[in-house]
Amino acid sequence: MTKPAVETNQKELVSKEEMLSLYRLMLLIRRFEESTYRKYREGKIGGYLHRYDGQEALVAGIIPQLRKDDYILCTYRDHAHALACGTDPRHVMAELMGRATGCAYGKGGSMHLIDPDNGFYGGDGIVGGPVPIALGVGYAIKYRGGDQVCVCYFGDGAFNQGGVHESLNMSALYGIPVLFILENNKYAMGTRVERSTHQSDFLLKARAYGIEAERMDGMDVLEIRSRTQSIISNMRRESKPYFIEMNAYRFLGHGVADNPQQQKFYRSESEIEEWKNRDPIHLLGRKLEKMGWLDDSEKEQIEESVKLDVEEAISYAERSPEPAIEALYEHVYG
């Protein structure tokens, strides 16, 4: 007998297929990120590298429910967003390795992934950088009379940037359909939010501009999915901004140079372990197991499938050519 779909907090049905799809996406992101560290240590990935381990639910809970003609922008911690948008893992890995087959033709690297065909308008290496751009994208939607939404991810450290406040003000003033997602992982690089921001209640700041705002558990993909469905639907009808603070945690340091020893200077091992007990992948996996929708055999099959995807992405990238010297002058606007 087929078990009924599970009911979320807002009584919206989530089928077994949808839940397994979310589980696989988050697992793909985790395994992909783990592989990037290995390739970085091998010297295959240059520049800098920021991993998303622990924050997978932030993208898995929102991006899969968007339409093909919606828009997504994010920070330089952008591998997960590209994968969630549907960018081929091979093209993401090729970009990280600086190959011509990468999603930015090998010119962007880790911090500047982009895939407009899938609505992903890119990662941004500037703190707070994607927020004013999202305002412009949202204004274009409004100007053309469309019902798309623009989803913009940024970090807690970005909230002290002037452009963020200007964008919030203008989005409220003109009714711009931007869904602002604050990825509050508690640390801007290595500084805890309370040490850099006197008023750390970010909802108050968004509401000060007349924007509706709420806080969500960034480790629970089903809560995110359920609560954002009606928000996105209302934004399409009413053409207005919305602000969500997602409380989450990155299990690793700010970037590859931030090793475990350095992390001890600004956060404790007990704090890290406490958050790892709420690993979003394990939380969803346990829920699926409890419902009888995921057993050890199925879990192994998903793990093996993800492993093959990551291995193929690495193989494809390593086989791909580097950009030609002449390509340096392509896609340049002055």
Image (cartoon, helix red, strand yellow):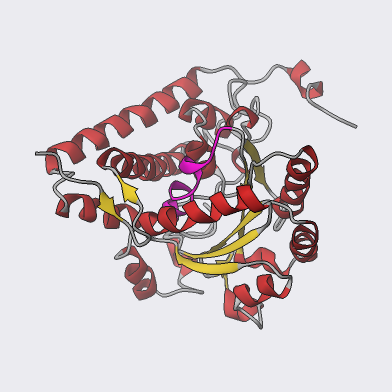
Q: Nearer the viewer, residue 27 or 1?
A: 1
The magenta span reads 54-68
- Left or right of residue 303: residue 316: right
Quadrant occupied by the N terminus: top left
**Given the current orientation, which residue lies at the most extreme bottom position?**
198
61 falls in the magenta region: yes
At 28% from the left edge and 43% from the top edge, which residue is drawn? Answer: 15
Q: Quadrant of residue 95?
A: top right
Residue 215 in picture, x, y percent from top left:
51, 69
Q: Is residue 164 visible?
A: yes
Relative vertical location of residue 119 with respect to residue 272 in this rendering, above or below: above
Q: Nearer the viewer, residue 159 or 146?
A: 146
Q: Point out residue 261 in the picture as x, y percentages from the top left corner.
A: 45, 66
Residue sitting at x 70%, y 39%: 146
Q: Position of residue 96 (x, y in %)?
A: 56, 34
| Residue 244 inside the magenta-drawn segment | no
Q: Position of residue 130 (x, y in %)?
A: 70, 50
Q: Is residue 291 left or right of residue 108?
A: left
The answer to whether residue 75 is seen in the rendering is no
User: Of all residues shown, which one is farthest toward the right?
Assistant: 334
Decide if residue 18 is on the left or right side of residue 75: left
Residue nearer the viewer, 41 or 4:
4
